[in-house]
């Protein structure tokens, strides 16, 4: 479990390629992440527009299961967090089979942004909309150990694009998603709002019927869910 992480700082939009960089800490190796540098960073000519707060209402919660169930779970996770990948590939698949696919509970996944790589992964996973989101998320986590270590930022982006193409997205769709600066800013602002509201300080974290839990064995989570279903 990643114990703590910084709130991400302002978005820097690189002029070449339009990729977005954040100051922060890499959840995989805990080394500082430097902003992506180009000859000149893109700047808004309108200072008021540049300083305006990012809109968060447009960001969609990604959900599965029964929204009307008495038991609702929110997972907070980062695509660059190894413990989140382990949860996705193991306990989450059990949770899905036992409670989500049969509509016993409602489940919401919310992204945490440790670094620019996690943001890029999020932008790819959201590129296909809600229908493709969880499938792409599984693919990103399954390949985490490869794409996060692909090398230079451009190589990491290309590995994420490959995952997007395997999910049925074309290059034009991926380019549009990855170069959407307003969406990137909104996603970070949305995460910061969620972090403050739910006091998230590690990943993966879970909010089960309003109560926060840190990472746990699936058997323990199952006990909590079963007890809540019986209330």
Image: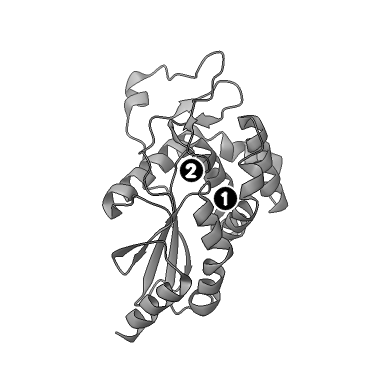
Q: Along the polypeptide, which appears first: circle 2 or circle 1?
A: 2
- Gap in angstroms between the C-alphas marked 2 and 1: 18 Å
* Residue at point 53%, 25% (across, down): 36
Q: Where is residue 64 drawn, in percent x and y?
A: 49, 67
Left or right position of 31 against 209: right
Q: Secondary structure at mark 2?
A: loop
Q: Is residue 34 visible?
A: yes
Q: In the depicted view, which residue is nearer to us: 90 or 66?
A: 90
The colour scheme used to paint the residues is one colour
Could you tell me which residue is drawn at 36 percent across and 45 percent down? 4
Q: Secondary structure at mark 1?
A: helix
| Residue at horizontal 54 percent and vertical 50 percent from the top | 126
Cβ–Cβ below 8 Å for labels 2 and 1?
A: no
Q: What residue lies at 55% left-to-right and 59% top-to-bottom?
A: 86
Q: Nearer the viewer, residue 57 or 18?
A: 18
Identify the image quadrant of residue 217: bottom left
Measured as percent of width and height from the top left, residue 125 is found at 57, 50
Q: Is residue 173 visible?
A: no
Mark 1 surroundings within 10 Å by alpha-carbon count, few (fewer than 14), some (14 through 19), many (20 or more): many
**Which label number is shown at residue 27?**
2
Question: Which residue in the structure is indicated by mark 1?
Answer: 125
Report the quarter where the C terminus lies. Answer: bottom left
């Amino acid at each position: 479990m990643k114990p703590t992480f910084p709130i991400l700082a302002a978005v820097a939009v690189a002029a070449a390629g339009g990729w977005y960089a954040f100051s922060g800490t890499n959840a995989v190796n805990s080394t500082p992440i430097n902003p992506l540098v180009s000859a000149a960073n893109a700047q808004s000519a309108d200072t008021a527009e540049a300083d305006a707060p990012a809109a968060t209402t447009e960001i969609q919660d990604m959900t599965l299961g029964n929204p009307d169930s008495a038991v609702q779970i929110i997972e907070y996770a980062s695509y660059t967090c190894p413990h989140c990948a382990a949860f996705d590939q193991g306990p989450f698949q059990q949770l899905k089979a036992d409670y989500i696919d049969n509509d016993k509970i409602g489940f919401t996944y919310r992204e945490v942004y440790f670094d620019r790589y996690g943001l890029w992964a999020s932008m790819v996973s959201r590129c296909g909309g809600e229908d493709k989101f969880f499938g792409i998320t599984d693919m990103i986590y399954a390949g985490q150990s490869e794409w996060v270590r692909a090398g230079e930022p451009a190589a990491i982006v290309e590995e994420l694009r490959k995952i997007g193409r395997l999910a049925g997205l074309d290059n034009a769709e991926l380019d549009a998603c990855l170069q959407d600066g307003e969406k990137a800013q909104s996603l970070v602002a949305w995460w910061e709002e969620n972090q403050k509201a739910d006091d998230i300080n590690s990943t993966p974290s879970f909010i089960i019927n309003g109560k926060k839990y840190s990472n746990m064995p699936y058997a323990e989570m199952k006990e909590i869910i079963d007890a809540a279903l019986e209330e």
